[in-house]
Image (cartoon, rainbow, N blue to C red):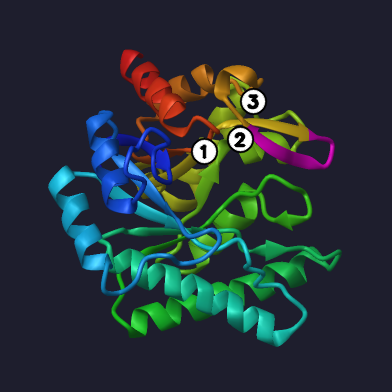
């Protein structure tokens, strides 16, 4: 991907006939370029419906990705929960691929007060198993473990870059709002934004910057991390300087807006980025 595309986390709120197909069409009408399928409660598109979604997205020139269910913990103590988590990621990836999408985003798990290195190995093993299954099925899709907003969740950028460097077909979903929240207000200055992008380039090379998948929103947080998403203008998220740094590093990929007013803030981000 050679440019930065902007889109919504789910069907735009202003979609009159609220469905995935009409949501894709609404994204194009709004002048946006991407939509993330929100499988956060369940994978709600069937194998039979997926080809129609793919056809519509191709016709409207809208890039699709998905967010897998929240009920995932690759570090669960119970083996059946790890297996179920793996299956949820695999199912999300399979349906998204049938829809023409190339990225599946997921929260990898929780620390559960365990040794961080042990947690890392457990989650690495889970992601490797997901990758093995998808590769055997011939499914060409990027696994995107997401930087999370709470300190109890796995994990920050460093761990996800480490996994991405170790496992082919894995790259991080960088949620800049989460990175801001999990550090209780840090990661919100020009120099910190530059440092994060430099980390990505050092770990994954230019490809890491040319194939990014980003989440962004306003965010409310405490010392423990994320509380809830906010509209950008109602938050302290320093999005203008962030977008300037994106432009400085000439990044490319997809930016998914998760603000409560998803399409309004997505358009705000797109317009501001294009004005730089």
Residue at 65% x, 31% y is: 219
Q: Which mark is residue 148?
A: none
**Mark 3 vs mark 2: in front:** 2
**Mark 1 vs mark 2: in front:** 1
The segment highlighted magenta reads 222-229
Mark 3 lies on a secondary structure that is loop
**Mark 2 — residue?**
177
* Separation of residues labelled 3 and 2 (CA atoms): 9 Å
Placement of the N terminus among the 4 image quadrants: top left
**Mark 3 vs mark 1: in front:** 1
224 vs 240, left or right, is right
**Mark 3 — residue?**
188
Label 3 or label 1, whichever comes before in sequence order? 3
**Mark 1 — residue?**
258
Q: Say whether residue 56 is magenta.
A: no
46 vs 38, left or right, is left
Residue 63 in view here? yes
Task: Note whether 65 is above or below 233 in the view shown.
Answer: below
Residue at 62% x, 22% y is: 189
Which of the 4 quarters of the picture holds residue 260? Answer: top right
């Amino acid at each position: 991907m050679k440019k930065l595309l902007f889109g919504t986390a789910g069907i735009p709120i202003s979609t009159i006939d609220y469905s995935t197909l009409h949501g894709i069409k609404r994204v194009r009408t709004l002048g946006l370029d991407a939509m993330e399928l929100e499988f956060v409660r369940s994978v709600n598109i069937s194998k039979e419906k997926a080809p129609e979604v793919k056809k519509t997205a191709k016709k409207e020139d809208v890039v699709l990705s998905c967010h897998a269910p929240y009920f995932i913990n690759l570090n669960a103590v119970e083996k059946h929960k790890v297996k179920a988590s793996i299956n949820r990621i695999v199912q999300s990836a399979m349906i998204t691929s049938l829809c023409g999408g190339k990225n599946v985003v997921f929260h990898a798990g929780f620390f559960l007060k365990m040794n961080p290195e042990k947690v890392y190995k457990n989650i690495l093993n889970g992601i490797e198993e997901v990758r093995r299954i998808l590769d055997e099925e011939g499914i060409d899709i990027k696994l995107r473990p997401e930087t999370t907003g709470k300190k109890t969740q796995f994990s920050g950028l460093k761990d996800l870059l480490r996994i991405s460097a170790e496992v082919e077909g894995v790259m991080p979903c960088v949620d800049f709002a989460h990175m801001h929240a999990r550090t209780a207000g840090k990661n919100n200055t020009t120099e910190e934004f530059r440092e994060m992008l430099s980390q990505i380039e050092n770990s994954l090379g230019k490809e890491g910057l040319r194939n990014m998948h980003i989440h962004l929103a306003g965010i409310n947080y405490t010392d423990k991390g994320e509380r809830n998403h906010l509209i950008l203008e109602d938050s302290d998220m320093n999005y203008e300087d962030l977008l300037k740094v994106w432009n400085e590093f000439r990044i490319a990929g997809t930016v998914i807006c998760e603000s409560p007013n998803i399409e309004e803030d997505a358009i705000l981000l797109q317009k501001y980025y294009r004005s730089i």
